Image (cartoon, rainbow, N blue to C red):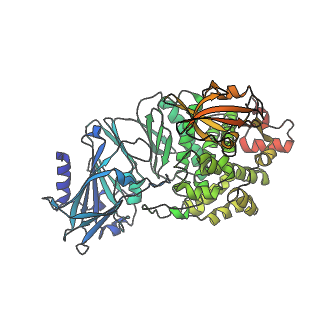
């Protein structure tokens, strides 16, 4: 054990340890001091003395434990809010040990389940627990430690004490080098360097740490401080990005009437090919391709990611389903409303950069067209209803397999599409005087500000009150049912239609290819397609078409030499056996859809469009 860790532990075990009230900032929970009088003090130290080993060394000190409780239970979360999959974080824990007193007398302990440790206290009221966490997975929801930084999420690093989740938690960081800096949304503890305070375990889980060599950029929006912390090298232009982030913040704050925090932190990791984000109450974690900022489409995609995670500080962090009102960190927390928490957020992450002036009308409609294309080319939309997709997120969305596109529908994507239809429905009924924005504002006032969880019935009632009509049929068809979304019906009042692009499409085969280690592998076979009907399977290695070698890259080009109804021979290795399958090609299917203006829009359609997007229909085609 390193010297700084010993000093930390000894300091906590002395009689002159200051009560946690002395560390509190004025903006903390006013009821906190009452809870502190009888509650145990929970102190963590996170050290990383050998970062090249990817091992965080964690020390937990518990002081003022009740003497009449002979055992202490410690549990590690199995998931983290915002990422709906049981990830079994305790699988990365090793070298667990428990001690009592300054002389570190070992305490007996046993493991009761995958994430549950129980310690025999032998009358002790103060104890120390040490363990290591292996951290070599660079995502926004896991931990990563190397020679340049240590990043961790609370759920993936810390224990909680059942029944004491509302107790404050102090966290001290011991960097391996004095040049390493610390970034977190948690407030610092006065007169205690590198030490931070979470008012409860939920706040600790909701406050990731970035410790290491990184760049920090500070800026203000509406008089409140913001920080952008960037780890990694790339072609990011900080001034441009900060200007655009300020625009997104201002536009989203305008919808809700202000910013619901005192300060905010953006954590950005630049990597070779990562993409993703995870929202937190006063911060967000982002990961993006290090050289993805010069190309305009890729830059726009990053701004959409920022807009998405920032919008979550209202929608899901504060406006949250009833199932998330109190988190159960040991198991799945089921809700059919993720379509709203995530899908509606996806709807807004496209339009807010447009409202903020970061990209223009054509860019917005092109981005929306791409989303509609993704939806209409996902066969699982005919199989899994939206509400079921939300409910089954825990076993499906994050566990993709070769058949997932046939059997699943993303609640992000369909939720975005349904939100679009609801927005257009409300706007058309009320001449743009009402919109989905009003739904968000009502949800904020009724559920977000008081932080009361909403039920599916609450949500439908709010949407119906804004729309001014009964939407039972809409919800039955498009949330709980499998009816096709009638895009043209909702776009038409705004002078728009959806155009399927069949130009140059080859006859339909129904499989997707990928080159892996020099092998042309079939990765996906669409249900009821010519390929599936012929017995082709995901995992087959494609060799030849009509006896001539073919690659995935040139397969469509070769198919253009044939007509629908023609039968071709595809030679594959199927489970290492050489096989030739006869495949009868079908009519071409669209692989691209585009929102286009109607040829002769009426004055009402023109007016509706201008009220929606603030431009004339003539500007759609430039």
Q: Position of residue 83 (x, y in %)?
A: 49, 51
Exactly how many numbered labels are in the figure?
Answer: 0
Residue at position x 67%, y 40% from top?
534
Residue at position x 26%, y 70% from top?
71
Q: Position of residue 25 (x, y in %)?
A: 35, 56
Residue at position x 26%, y 64% from top?
110
Q: Which of the pair 607/381 is nearer the observer?
A: 381
Q: Quadrant of residue 586?
A: top right
Q: Which of the pair 231/220 is nearer the observer?
A: 231
Left or right of 576, for residue 125: left
Q: Position of residue 72 (x, y in %)?
A: 28, 67
Specify whether residue 451 is in view. no
Q: Quadrant of residue 616?
A: top right
Q: Which of the pair 517/462 is nearer the observer?
A: 517
Left or right of 328, for residue 375: right
Q: Position of residue 427 (x, y in %)?
A: 75, 51
Left or right of 428, for residue 187: left
Residue at position x 63%, y 41% from top?
525
Q: Is 519 above or below relative to 81?
A: above
Q: Residue furthest left?
A: 103
Q: Quadrant of the C terminus?
A: top right
Specify whether residue 426 is in view. yes
């Amino acid at each position: 054990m390193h010297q700084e860790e010993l000093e930390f532990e000894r300091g906590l075990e002395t009689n002159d340890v200051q009560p946690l009230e002395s560390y509190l900032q004025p903006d903390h929970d006013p009821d906190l001091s009452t809870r502190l009088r009888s509650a145990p003090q929970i102190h963590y130290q996170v050290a990383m003395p050998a970062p090249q080993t990817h091992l965080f060394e964690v020390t937990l000190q518990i002081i003022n434990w009740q003497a009449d409780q002979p055992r202490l239970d410690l549990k590690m979360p199995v998931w983290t809010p915002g990422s709906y999959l049981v990830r079994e974080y305790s699988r990365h824990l090793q070298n667990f040990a428990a001690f009592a007193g300054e002389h570190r007398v070992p305490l007996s302990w046993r493991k009761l389940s995958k994430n549950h440790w129980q310690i025999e206290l032998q009358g002790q009221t103060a104890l120390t627990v040490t363990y290591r966490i292996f951290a070599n997975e660079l995502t926004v929801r896991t931990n990563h430690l190397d020679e340049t930084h240590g990043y961790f999420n609370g759920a993936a690093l810390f224990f909680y004490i059942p029944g004491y989740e509302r107790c404050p938690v102090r966290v001290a960081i011991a960097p391996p080098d004095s040049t390493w800096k610390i970034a977190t949304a948690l407030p610092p503890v006065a007169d205690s360097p590198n030490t931070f305070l979470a008012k409860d375990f939920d706040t600790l889980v909701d406050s990731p740490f970035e410790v290491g060599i990184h760049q920090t950029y500070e800026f203000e929006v509406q008089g409140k401080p913001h920080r952008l912390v960037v780890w990694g090298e790339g072609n990011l232009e900080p001034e441009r990005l900060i200007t655009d982030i300020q625009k997104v913040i201002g536009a989203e704050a305008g919808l809700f009437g202000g910013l619901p925090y005192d300060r905010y932190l953006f954590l950005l990791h630049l990597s070779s090919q990562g993409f993703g984000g995870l929202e937190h109450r006063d911060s967000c974690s982002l990961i993006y391709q290090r050289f993805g900022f010069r190309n305009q489409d890729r830059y726009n995609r990053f701004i959409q990611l920022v807009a998405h995670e920032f919008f979550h500080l209202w929608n899901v962090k504060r406006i949250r389903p009833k199932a998330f009102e109190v988190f159960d960190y040991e198991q799945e927390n089921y809700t059919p409303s993720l379509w709203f928490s995530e899908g509606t957020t996806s709807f807004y992450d496209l339009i807010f950069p447009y409202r903020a002036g970061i990209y223009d009308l054509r860019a917005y409609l092109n981005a929306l067209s791409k989303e509609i294309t993704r939806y209409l080319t996902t066969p699982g939309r005919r199989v899994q209803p939206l509400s079921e997709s939300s409910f089954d997120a825990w076993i499906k969305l994050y566990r993709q397999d070769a058949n997932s596109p046939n059997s699943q529908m993303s609640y992000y994507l369909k939720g975005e599409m349904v939100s679009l239809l609801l927005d257009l429905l409300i706007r058309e009924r009320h001449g743009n005087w009402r919109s989905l924005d009003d739904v968000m504002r009502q949800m904020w006032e009724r559920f977000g500000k008081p932080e009361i969880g909403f039920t599916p019935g609450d949500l439908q009632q709010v949407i119906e009150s804004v729309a001014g009509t009964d939407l039972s049929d809409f919800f039955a068809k498009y949330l709980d049912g499998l009816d096709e979304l009638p895009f043209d019906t909702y776009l038409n009042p705004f002078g728009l239609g959806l155009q399927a692009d069949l130009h140059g499409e080859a006859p339909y085969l129904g499989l997707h290819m990928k080159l892996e280690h020099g092998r042309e592998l079939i990765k996906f076979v669409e249900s009821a397609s010519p390929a599936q009907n012929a017995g082709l399977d995901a995992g087959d290695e494609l060799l030849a078409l009509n006896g001539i070698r073919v690659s995935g890259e040139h397969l469509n080009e070769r198919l253009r030499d044939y007509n629908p109804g023609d039968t071709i021979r595809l030679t594959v290795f199927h489970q290492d056996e050489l096989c030739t399958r006869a495949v009868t090609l079908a009519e071409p299917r669209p692989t691209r859809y585009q929102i286009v203006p109607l040829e002769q829009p009426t004055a009402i359609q023109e007016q509706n469009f201008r009220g929606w997007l603030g431009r004339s229909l003539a500007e759609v085609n430039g």
